[in-house]
Image (cartoon, grey):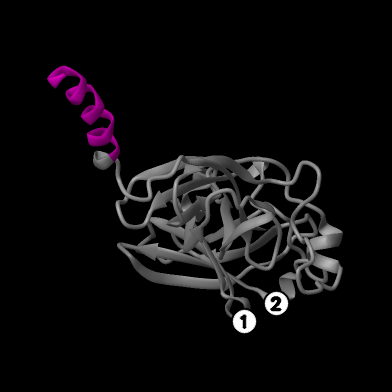
Amino acid sequence: MRCLRSIAIVPLLLLLAAPAGAQDAVPTQVTVRAVSNDAKLIQDPVGGAHITIEHVETGEVLAEGRQSGDSGSTEKIMRQPHERGASIYEAPGAAKYETTLDLAEPTRVRVTAEGPLDYPQAMQTASKTVLLVPGEDVAGDGITLTLHGFIVEVLRPSASDVNPGGDVPVRARVQMMCGCPTKPGGLWDATRYTIRAQLLREGAVVAEEPLSFTGTTSEYEGALSMPDAGADQVRVTATDADRVNFGMGTMSL
């Protein structure tokens, strides 16, 4: 009889030991898109973006990976008026990061994007916190994160271009963070931007001039007078303060 009572008590003890309100985890789809400010999605040709989703309270990384795909529809993103609730970024092949989280309860997460990954000198980071609810999929445009700036690459001078007391030709490529092209009068209108080249010696600016459009998409050029004392670096900056986009590229001499 004592043995039977013990057997009956065991399931009751297990039930009492179970956490109150414990629930099974529910698979929940989450879509994230990193976007270039005033432009399109951070796409594969610029390396995409690294996406991280972490639990706000514990710091645990719940998912991470690379956003991949193309820059999305120019027509939808840049030309069409956007009605409230309308899809802007969702299109076949459009860049995104997609994952499935197993959530047992409403969970506040921090979502972070860093990119463009192929241009370390241009990389920026953006993050936001979002409450996710089990079973409530985040699809379509998803959680969007905006990266501000320009990709600036110094293409010239070469070593043979640098002579003390002479002019130093400078050529640079300036693109949006998504790799979208810039030019005067274009969809990304370079007449809005200030693009300048500087010569530096030990961190101090010793010469500075604006760069002009070359006629080749996204490329700008000019010349700097090399002081007799020389310089050790060329720096090119691109700025659009009205839209909070700034970029910089450097080359050692």
Task: Characterize the local packing of mark 1: few (<14), some (14-19) or many (20 or more) Cα atoms within 10 angstroms.
Answer: few
Q: Is residue 102 above or below residue 107?
A: above
Q: How many marks?
A: 2
User: Residue 69, relative to residue 190: is it above or below?
Assistant: above
Instruction: Report the side of 4 relative to 159 (left or right).
Output: left
Does dot 2 land on a helix, a strand or a loop? helix
Residue farthest bottom in this picture: 242
User: In the image, residue 189 lies at what x, y percent?
Assistant: 76, 70
Can residue 6 be found in the magenta stretch? yes
User: Which secondary structure, mark 1?
Assistant: helix
- Residue 123 appears left or right of 142: left
Residue segment shown in magenta: 1-15
> Mark 2 or mark 1, which is nearer the start of the sequence?
2
Q: Nearer the viewer, residue 193 or 52?
A: 52
The answer to whether the residues at label 1 and label 2 have Cβ atoms under 8 Å apart is yes
Residue 117, x across and y down, in percent: 52, 44
Task: Confirm whether residue 163 shows in the render.
Answer: no
Residue at screen point 80% across, 59% down: 215
Chief SS of the magenta region: helix
Q: Position of residue 237 (x, y in %)?
A: 53, 66
Q: Amino acid at mark 1?
A: Asp
Tell me the kind of residue under disc 2: Arg
Q: Which residue is mark 2?
A: 192
Q: Quadrant of residue 39?
A: bottom right
Q: Which residue is mark 1?
A: 242
**Farthest residue, direction front:** 1
| 18 w.r.t. 32: above or below | above
Q: Is residue 233 magenta?
A: no
Task: Say the numbered circle drawn on residue 104.
Answer: none
